[in-house]
């Protein structure tokens, strides 16, 4: 299978803003297992800005765009070095893919990016994708990496998109409310507006509303989407091998007509 895995800053970053190497290492272990079983995996990883933020204190105030450019420029190096070292223990080569929203609006740029990533996958390289924050301005940025992951999954005709969050999936209410229940399956066309809010959390730009919107758009293209808790032990492998044993929300893919 071709799987796109998106992991957010809240999984990859500690409360003090430094990289959560424990979670990162566990994620790499699982992706290496999937890779070893013949699956093609694309990793859409947040965390560069948070890595940079934990590395430097600006000597003067910065606006939001300048701060993001500074932190991401420093943090992206740290982030990709962590991944490269961890994957190298399994003999796996990774490739960095930095992209911008405008690359998805130009047919030529879209095709070039698509061919680049297919070439990486065809040579058993794991692409690690993130937004090129150093070159992006606010109005040209992706809403968040949930949106980016959805676009990548569609571009590559993935079999599945897995969005790793800090909760187990979509709940009928606030996950912290004991009366809220996890929604295991979301069929095509179900309205979830009463179940989610647009509140952002932690270090990330997105929230559950963004994840839900991405999941609905991607599943409408015939791609299965799972939202699950990223720091749950062995979550990726279990989702692939014994999904009934893992709390998660599955957005059922739209069935396409076949001849």
Image: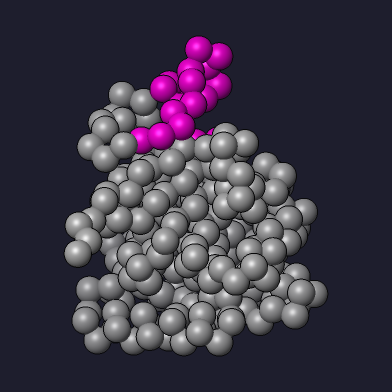
Q: Residue furthest top?
A: 179
**In the rendered view, would you say 15 is above or below 135?**
above
Residue at image position (35%, 44%) is: 252
Q: Is residue 178 magenta?
A: yes
Residue at image position (43%, 82%) is: 118
Instruction: Give coordinates of residue 235: x percent, y percent.
Output: 64, 47
**In the rendered view, would you say 33 is above or below 200?**
below
Instruction: Give coordinates of residue 85: x percent, y percent.
Output: 75, 75
Residue at image position (21%, 81%) is: 107
Q: Nearer the viewer, residue 39 or 258?
A: 258
Q: Is residue 114 magenta?
A: no
Span colored in magenta = 167-186
Instruction: Give coordinates of residue 220: x percent, y percent.
Output: 26, 51
Instruction: Give coordinates of residue 203: x percent, y percent.
Output: 55, 48
> For the stretch drawn in magenta, what is the main secondary structure?
loop
Please indicate whether residue 37 sits to the left or right of residue 150 in the image.
right
Q: Residue furthest right?
A: 89
The C terminus - image quarter:
bottom left
Residue at image position (43%, 86%) is: 116
Q: Residue furthest front?
A: 259
**In the rendered view, would you say 256 is above or below 259?**
above
């Amino acid at each position: 299978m071709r799987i796109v895995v998106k992991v957010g800053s809240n999984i990859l970053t500690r409360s003090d803003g430094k990289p959560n190497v424990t979670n990162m290492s566990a994620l790499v272990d699982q992706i290496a297992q999937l890779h070893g079983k013949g699956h093609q995996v694309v990793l859409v990883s947040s965390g560069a800005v948070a890595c940079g933020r934990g590395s430097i204190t600006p000597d003067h105030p910065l606006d939001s765009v300048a701060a993001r450019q500074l932190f991401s420029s420093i943090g992206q190096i740290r982030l990709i070095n962590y991944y490269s070292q961890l994957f190298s223990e399994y003999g796996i080569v990774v490739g960095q893919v930095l992209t911008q929203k405008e690359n998805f609006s130009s047919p030529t740029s879209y095709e070039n990016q698509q061919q680049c990533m297919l070439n990486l996958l065809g040579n058993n390289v794991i692409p690690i994708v993130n937004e090129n924050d150093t070159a992006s301005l606010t109005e040209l940025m992706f809403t968040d990496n949930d949106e980016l992951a959805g676009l990548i999954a569609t571009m590559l005709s993935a079999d599945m998109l897995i969005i790793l969050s800090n909760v187990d999936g979509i709940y009928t209410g606030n996950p912290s409310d004991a009366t809220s229940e996890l929604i295991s399956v979301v069929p095509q066309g179900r309205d979830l507006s009463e179940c989610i809010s647009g509140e952002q959390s932690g270090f990330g730009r997105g929230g559950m509303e963004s994840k839900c919107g991405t999941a609905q758009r991607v599943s409408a293209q015939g791609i299965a989407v799972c939202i699950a808790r990223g720091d749950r032990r062995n979550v990726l492998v279990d989702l692939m091998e014994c999904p009934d044993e893992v709390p998660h929300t599955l957005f059922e893919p739209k069935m396409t007509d076949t001849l």
